Image: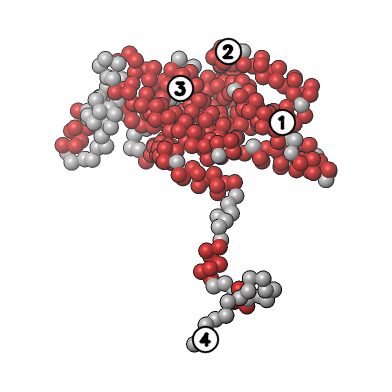
Amino acid sequence: MMEEKKKNILSMQLNVDDFVPASPDEKESLVVMRESVNFWQDGFRRLRRNKIAMTALVVVIIMLILAFIVPLFYPYGYEQQIKGAERLAPMQYSETELEAIANGESVFPHILGTDQNGRDYCIRVLVGARVSMTVGIVASALILLIGATIGAIAGFFGGMVDMIIMRIVDILYTVPDVLIIILLAQALQYPLQSLAQVPGFSWITAMGPNMMSMFVVFALLYWVGMARIVRGQIMVLKQNEYVTAAKALGATNGRVIKKHLITNCIGTLIVTTTLQIPSSIFTESFLSFLGIGVQAPMPSLGSLASAALNGLQTYPEKLFAPAVMIFIIILSFNLLGDGLRDAFDPKMK
């Protein structure tokens, strides 16, 4: 066999073997780019890698199930008074219930015992968690809606509009919220009682004027932090070329804010709102602890903790149950908010 002739490196002749089509394996080995993902896919992928945040998310889901679903199937009501079952210890039965068990009847145990009125304490803690979480979520939604809108307007228009809005924000920071809640509760008491008589508004009686005034205060005072964050984001984003292009194409200011600016702030809004939920829950629990929260017999975690102080040495579990529930809910939302910030905040990447 003849030796293959060496090709002269100075020759202009092309080698045909260099133009043979690549095999599928060779093509795949040349692909170095990762799969293209959008903002949400990238954020949720980062979130799934955060074990602490995912654990907090699971705990939040469990708390939501305990607060909103379990009470629907629980055999006792939060305001149901059981005669002869006052101040029972956890997993203890009253004499009447023991007789029923002796007769072969099935009686559901009082997992956390009962209070001084013979009401099952476990269902009251679960309903109290539902009230606190509802207040936290609704209040955070109000803060998001009002704060994002006002902050976007201030950041987009700037100038005199921005100065007036920011001075209003500075003034609202100095307003004592507890005092405003007390004053509003007194002012709204009679109008709300009249409105509760209208068919379809009976739920106002259960919540009471204190809780309604709390929502009003959240809407009037607590949006200032959200407004400042959104304002800062909008002031940076409005300098981008796509905003100039949208204006050149005839887009109105409202459309630019809604479609281009707020949309690009959505990651920051989600993170800030998630971190606002535990703050709202803590505020509601604190106000209920002071006695200006929900109206009895509707329980709240703060009001349950306040009522348990009188028998702390004799019945310590009556204080520990709502306190531990507040601790778990607030800690879980805070850890989840930190995980969302790490996943969706561009500055953290």
Which percent across, then down, holds residue 170? Answer: 66, 16
Which percent across, then down, holds residue 224? Answer: 63, 23
What residue is shown at x 41% (from left), y 26% (from top)? 326
Asked whether the beta carbons under mark 1 and mark 4 sit within 8 Å of each other, the answer is no
Q: Amino acid at mark 4?
A: Met
Which of disc 2 and disc 1 is earlier in sequence?
Answer: 2
Q: Quadrant of the C terminus?
A: top right
Helix or strand or loop: what does disc 2 sit on? loop
Q: CA distance from mark 3 to mark 1?
A: 36 Å
Which of disc 3 and disc 2 is earlier in sequence?
Answer: 2
Q: CA distance from mark 1 to mark 2?
A: 30 Å
Q: CA distance from mark 3 to mark 4?
A: 93 Å
Asked whether the beta carbons under mark 3 and mark 1 sit within 8 Å of each other, the answer is no
The residue wearing badge 1 is 235
The residue wearing badge 2 is 176
What residue is shown at x 56% (from left), y 67% (from top)? 27
Q: CA distance from mark 1 to mark 4?
A: 76 Å
Task: Estimate how packed mark 3 is, as few (under 14), some (14 to 19) or many (20 or more) residues with alpha carbons within 10 Å.
Answer: many
Which percent across, then down, holds residue 166? Answer: 70, 20
Tell me the quarter of the picture where residue 221 sits.
top right
- Observer-nearest residue: 104 or 10? 10
